[in-house]
Amino acid sequence: MVRLDITRGSPRPFAAHGPGSALVRLPGMNSGHDQDSLRHHGDVDAEHGLLDFAVNVRLDRPPAWLRHRLTAALDRLGRYPSAADNLAARAAAAARHGRDASEVLLLAGAAEGFALLPSLRPRLAALVHPSFTEPELALRTADVEVARVQLDPADGFRLDAGAVPEQADLVVLGNPTNPTSVLHQAAEIRRLLRPGRVVVVDEAFSDTVPGEPESLAGCREPGLLVFRSLTKMWGLPGLRAGYALGDPDLLRRLGRYRPHWPINALVLEAVVACCEPDALAESEQAAVEFEEHRAGLVAELDGIAGIQVAMPARAPFLLLRVDGGAEVRDALRQHGIAVRRGDTFPGLGPDHLRVAVRDPAQNALLVKALRDILGWG
Ligand SMILES: Cc1ncc(COP(=O)(O)O)c(C=O)c1O
């Protein structure tokens, strides 16, 4: 069963989507609880000094080789980034995904891509939830009407393309999805494509899945936009680096209201560096390690009565359901561990927690704390 919620504006007729579909109107979006929830991210949960299972960034700083590249690029801050510099970075990203440089728009992180979506002037945006909340925040703040398509936990939060309203001229989803860790099938995502509709796939975590089996980054389809991020794999949340892949005309519409020189010299250097063969090999190796570490963590968590792990999980984090989740989160903080609250994601509640997959030694600390808190120590 998939649920549908509509936000903004006065009630208007809307096609029902199967038995059990529900229409819920949410309050406006300029302030208030809804906005606070959508704006909440794991960095707020990860207070200084706590062992961080709240933020899903692989490293606490970029690797040394990348820091050296960025340091050398500081000399370029004395001039404006040129069209040739921009083209070189786009060419690097394009080559990584088997595309043309004209099919790449560099972004100040995938988050900027979401902020640009209102430039496409959508009339109805369907957002597949539970998912990263920035797209909804950006669209509702721009007064775009939004339909929430709530995936069903009983169905493993699996995408059902048929549940997305036909009228939607913009659809946004994540793959793999934050916070459920689900990896949707590329074929099911492609079923969302229609003439006159833009489908945005947030692949910020795609490089954490070995071989990226369901990525659409290399796929040339009218109306398909793929957002990629350097943040998670390369420990770069403070840099703001990513890019969009898609049809050149669509990218032009997406970026038409940006200021001049939107991408700085350090980001340009990072994109080039992270698309080089050695970086890609390191990233693939890290993805394989994530799989191993996640399997170990799932096995341990499965052994604790009272914890349910959303499966199958393919991303470097897990969605947990724990009775008394809010209290467990507080108790973990007392044990020096930060986890991400789940209740700010549409469709999840206080018993949901998201935990990052770390190395086995750190994962063992989380497991031990949970066992102690839940009385299995
Ligand atoms: C699923 C997802 N997409 C995109 C982003 C934003 O990525 P970036 O740092 O590239 O803006 C995040 C950050 O938390 C995320 O979790």
Image (tube, helix red, strand yellow):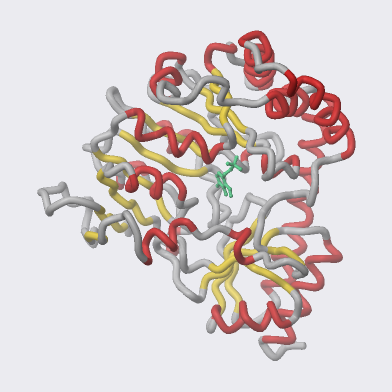
* Image x and y of residue 134, in percent: 46, 48
Residue at 75%, 70% (x, y): give it: 50
Residue at 32%, 42% (x, y): give it: 142
Residue at 82%, 58% (x, y): give it: 359
| Quarter holding residue 285 | top right
Q: Quadrant of ligand 1?
A: top right
Q: Is residue 187 left or right of residue 276?
A: left
244 versus 20 height, above or below = above
Specify whether residue 278 is in view: yes
209 versus 345 height, above or below = above
Of residues 65 and 261, the one drawn nearer to the viewer in this rendering: 261
Residue at 53%, 42% (x, y): give it: 175
74 versus 332 height, above or below = above
Quadrant in which the N terminus appears: bottom left
Residue found farthest to the top: 84
Specify whether residue 208 is in view: no
* Image x and y of residue 113, in percent: 49, 34
- Circle count: 0
Q: Is residue 179 left or right of residue 373?
A: left
Q: Is residue 140 left or right of residue 98?
A: left
Q: Is residue 183 left or right of residue 233?
A: left
Residue found farthest to the front: 78
Residue found farthest to the bottom: 375
* Image x and y of residue 264, in percent: 65, 26
16 versus 268 height, above or below = below
| Quarter holding residue 88 | top right
* Image x and y of residue 84, in percent: 66, 8
Of residues 34 and 197, the one drawn nearer to the viewer in this rendering: 34
| Quarter holding residue 138 | top left
Quadrant in which the C terminus appears: bottom right
